[in-house]
Amino acid sequence: MESQQEQKPLLLQTKLKPSSLSPSPPPSSRSLHEVEEILGYEFKNKSLLEQAFTHSTYNNNSFSYERLEFIGDAVLNLLMTKEQYFSYPNLGPGKLTRLRSANVDTEKLARVAVKHRLHHYLRHNKPLLDEQIQQFCDGISEYPLHSNGLIEVPKSLADIVESTVGAVFIDCDSSVDTVWKVFKRLLEPIIDPNTIKIHPVTELHEICQKRNLVIKFVDSWKESKAFNVFINGKLVGIGKHVSKKEVAYNRAAKNALDNIEKVFNEHPRGTREKIGTMNSVYYFSLVFLFTLITLSQFAP
């Protein structure tokens, strides 16, 4: 009879090669053993790992990562919820929800995939996927942590992270502690309350609401692959994207945020405060001078 220690999965201590954001070579040229080295985890059931990196287009949908992705998504949400609940005891549920979403959304997980080169091992027959991955790698270079919807994300990248979470979860007999030990390092940098950014659409609506401004998004997607943003009837922002309508919408909001001060304020931020301070000094100087003149009239 095997000992309890022998039945547990082995957490490997390996020195990994520097990660690369380059697109993947053909998966057949690589061994899934390399994935175990990246994870620092040795699978008891190797077929789970193979399944986790098999897209539904690869083998007529008879063997794919979709079921593992399903359970991995649930496990990852649970683990991130637990981590942030205990890490930030003073945060309310609304802020905790935003924080969790930022760390497990499609873009964040896709970044994990390319950072650790997991996409190199994905088996698929999607003609455009490698090109989309390259475009994503180029796009994230402008946004070190998260773009908040400003770039297009190949969903398959996030899928293989979730399916790998699911594969480890099943292989280690549903030990969430083992899964977190494996993936906490891979998920870094984890977005925290100091680094999370407001989505440009949300931020724009909040600013307009505070200033009693009327905002309108005009959909020109069919004609020009663009969205226009009008605020109080003035064109403030334009956003374009050739293949993803949602990205064009988000870019229009971001462009409007960049321009709103120029359009609706005579002076940019900072200048208004300086002018206000100068006006206050001028006012009190006049009061002081008027007081001196009044007192001089009563002097002997």
Image: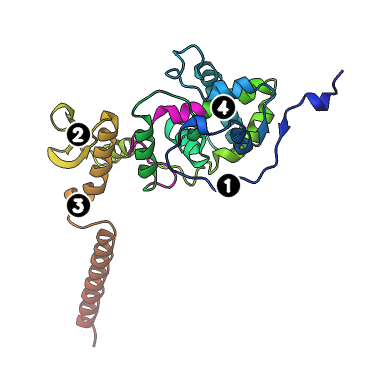
Quadrant hosting residue 125: top left
Disc 2 crowd rating (10 Å Cα; few below 14, some 14-19, many 20+) is: many
Q: Residue at x 37, y 39 (%)?
A: 134
Q: Amino acid at mark 2?
A: Phe
Q: Residue at x 53, y 40 (%)?
A: 116
Write down the region rendered in magenta. 143-160
C-alpha distance separating marks 3 and 1: 47 Å
Q: Secondary structure at mark 2?
A: strand
Looking at the image, is mark 1 or mark 4 earlier in the sequence?
1
Q: Which label sits in the foreground, 2 or 3?
A: 2
Disc 4 crowd rating (10 Å Cα; few below 14, some 14-19, many 20+) is: many
Is the C-beta separation of discs 2 and 1 under 8 Å?
Answer: no
Looking at the image, is mark 2 or mark 4 earlier in the sequence?
4
Q: Residue at x 50, y 22 (%)?
A: 54
Q: Nearer the viewer, residue 141 or 268?
A: 141
Q: Which residue is identified by label 2?
A: 227
Q: Which residue is identified by label 3?
A: 262
Image location (x, y in percent) of residue 4: 83, 24
Q: Which residue is identified by label 4?
A: 164
Residue 246 appears anywhere in the view: yes
Is the C-beta separation of discs 1 and 4 under 8 Å?
Answer: no
Is the C-beta separation of discs 3 and 4 under 8 Å?
Answer: no
What residue occupies the far right of the structure in this picture?
A: 1
Is 241 in the magenta?
no
Image location (x, y in percent) of residue 205: 29, 36
Q: Amino acid at mark 3?
A: Lys
Q: Amino acid at mark 4?
A: Thr
Q: Residue at x 25, y 33 (%)?
A: 249
Asked if residue 284 lies left or right of residue 50, the reply is: left
Is the C-beta separation of discs 2 and 4 under 8 Å?
Answer: no
Looking at the image, is mark 2 or mark 1 earlier in the sequence?
1
C-alpha distance separating marks 2 and 4: 37 Å
